[in-house]
Amino acid sequence: MKLLELDGVSFNYGSQLAPVLQELKFSIGAGQCHCVSGPTGSGKSSLLNLLAGVQNRPHEGEIWRHSELITGLVMQDPQTQLLRQTVGAEVAFALENLGIPAENMLPKVQLALRRVGLFLRLDTPVSTLSLGQKYRLMIAAQLVCEPHLLLLDEPWAQLDDHGVSELLTVLRDLIAEGMALVLVEHNAAAFTDIINHYWQLEAGRLSAGIYTVRDTPMHDEPTRYRGSASHQGKVLVSAEAFDFCFDGCQPLFRCPQGFQLHAGEIVALVGANGSGKTSLLKSIAGILSLKLRIPLKVLGRKPKLGVYGGELGLLLQRSNRQLFETSVLTEMQFSLHRFGLPKERAEQMLAELGLMMLAEQSPHKLSYGQQHLIALASLACLQPKVLLLDDPLAGMDKHYYGKVWYLLKRLSAQGCAILMSSHRVVEHSAVSRQLSLYNGLLTETIFAMDERDVG
Amino acid sequence: MWVSCSRWRLFVRRCWSRECQETMLCALSLFFVCILSACAFVLPVDLLLPLAAINGFLVLHGLARRGSIMGVVKLGVIQLTITLSLYLLLYGVGHLAQGAVVVGRIMLATIPGWWLCITAAPERIGEVLSAFLPSKWAFVVAASLSLLPYMAEEVREIYQIQCLRGARITPKALRNPKNWPELVYCVLFPVLIQLLKLSRQMAVAAQSRHFGKSTRVTHWHSPRDKK
Amino acid sequence: MKKKLPLSLQDSLFIGFCATLLVALTSMLRLKLGISGHSMFLMSFFYLICYGVLGRFGSMIACGGIAGLVAMALGVGKGGPMILLKFILPAIAMDLVALLLPLTLSLHWRCMILGIVGCMAWAVKVALSNVLAGMAFDVVLIQWGASVLKGGFFATLGALLVPPVLHRLKAHDLLHRDKF
């Protein structure tokens, strides 16, 4: 049974702006699973909003919907979709808006939660759930209206591997029950089990096929590429054994052996969502004050906000939050100016990355990948001694993924110690060591270099 | 008749849950506080003493609930100093008592508000106030309150990132109003962009869950309420 | 200004978030700076941002009303229910005066005038309670004047920062308004 069809649909965000979607042709039937992949900023989320019927701007072309079609939309960040405080109230929100009597809500809410495998008390505060649980809660909040078509926006980038496998189980059951599914996803490979139609969206046009993050091999140089030997061995960050705990709480994790960061190395900090990776990075940068201080020395000092000047850089997630200047060049020159470093470095950096054409553009008009790279480049041109990166590869398309690695390797060659967090193992030859943060334990994993070089 | 009475009683019992009791109590407290504050302004001078006694009880109760009275005391001292100095300058010593009474009235109007802040749970006050709002604005207030921790975290993170980038916005730097524009450009401006995005995302999230489609909105009662 | 009603859910949420942030930042800055009258800096800034971004009558009143409610709900300030007045009075005054201001007047001047109007209304709240308490008129006037001077400085500073911020938002294609 056909549920929805797009015929020659075009869409833009303003008459003077370039069209986001052009002449789309697309049809969805019951029980089908479609996956739309494409680079960041290609209009995937706009497509989902259009399919869900929540796009307020007019479009060209025809959208046909089955007369009884109910759609459910789950966007990228669960945090910005949570509208209530408790699990029960969150799921019941849609029922409230439809005027369903309170006494009829309970069985529907319980069923929706069961379908996504969330067996929680209805008065559980939403804030206590993990990111994976929150994502499934958002699906339950849509399932409660029994939609025929479910639309999901980039679940892979949000969830860790455990979260993805939980989600896959849920989605498989829903498709078996006859629900249609449209996934917008960079990494289609993670959902191959359930997808039957692949689409790629590039420059506003939809065509059959897969667009994946790493569909072209990265021309990695072997690990030995890194840095001159003189930088190696110089300890820039060191921590003795410690328990990481927020005020008055049980330890979030323990680090029985401590850890060190040496000049010129790239170390991956890998752990599940909510394991404490970001908090550890913030502690190293001195912006998280804990009652129980970690025995940590960064560049020979106890970490404190603002004491390192340009010697320490921190890039948090959604790095586009820090952009505020009117052009890319002034954005990159901001810190150089504040730390009294030569402003020319910004132009040199842009030229090196082949991004000179962006120099005079507004940083907010760039794609996510470009913004992220600009934020990273503006730290890189300070030539910091220690660089802390929180999940710098999340949501990057293949083009900018390569440029990020180029930049990291260049910094490492200059003797910068880089610690980068990720919720998945970082498979790149430039990474020399891995700090694993699983089951409340921070331990070190050393890669067998020969194996990696061969790989 | 008897059947309808028992149904009514059952209904009342269901509604009269612990949370409902708290909300009701908070509404009464709010009403009581408004009356007391108004009394501080309208009562004749000879009735101010009984009012002060009532306020005294409120202070004791507030202190027993571990409230800090320092803010109110500070306000009182500053107000007293300024007002009495002005009365002294303008009217002489003879009118000082009059000035003291005025400050007394202002303090008697302030204390009930302080007491309410300590004794009533903020979310209950929000609930009572939301009852007077149209459903859209009640939703906006509830969403804003529930997103407050998220927003506060966003502001903190953006502030810290910009501090690390060398922005002149540390508490020490901000003592100089010259640096305030930097705070606005580096922190408030990116925060505003986030708010614009956030409001768009939340509006889509609410609309995708049928917000605003029906004029007759019902309310979820958690099973705990029904016990 | 357009007088289209009602506001969309997105616009209403933006107002709500601005109001909440205003309250949160006011209480945070009070702890950090301890300077009296500084609340007018953030108040005039956020109200005028709502005025500039949405360009509708009532946006500032809505922001002030929600800020008052949120402040009460969060237990900010010493005055209890009086805090509602503190936030809503300047907003009402600013929105009403904004109706009278010609759109041909530059945004800078409009923001400055509205900021000062807001500050005067903010000081009225204190004066009102003083009058009700029976304070002599001269003393009320002096105290009101002192409040206006103190708050006026901060209000003007906040108001003057609004036009560049709005122009930046526009330059980044984040606002879909042609003219302020």
Image: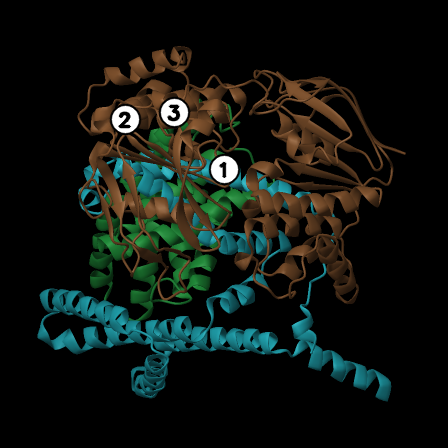
Quadrant for the N terminus of chain A in the image: top right
Q: Which residue is mark 1?
A: A425
The amino acid sitting under disc 2 is: Phe
A379 above or below A112? above
User: Numbered disc 1: what chain?
Assistant: A
The disc label shown at residue A334, or none: 2
Residue A150, relative to residue A397: is it above or below? below
**Upstream in the sequence, badge 2 or badge 1?**
2
Which callout, 2 or 1, points to the residue nearer the camera? 1
Q: As rendered, which of A22 and C110 lies closer to the eye?
A: A22
Residue that mark 3 sits on = A223
Q: In the rendered structure, which amino acid carries the disc numbered 3?
A: Thr
Colour given to chain B in the rendered image: cyan
Looking at the picture, how far across and down is residue A211, in whole percent? 63, 22
Residue B24 or residue B191, whichever sits in front? B191
Q: How far apart, in angstroms, are the residues tagged by discs 1 and 3?
A: 16 Å
Dot 2 and dot 3 residues touching (CB under 8 Å): no
Label 2 SS: helix
On the rendered structure, is B79 left or right of C178? Answer: left
Pick whichever of labels 2 and 3 is earlier in the sequence: 3
Query: Regarding mark 3 in the picture, which secondary structure is present there?
Result: helix
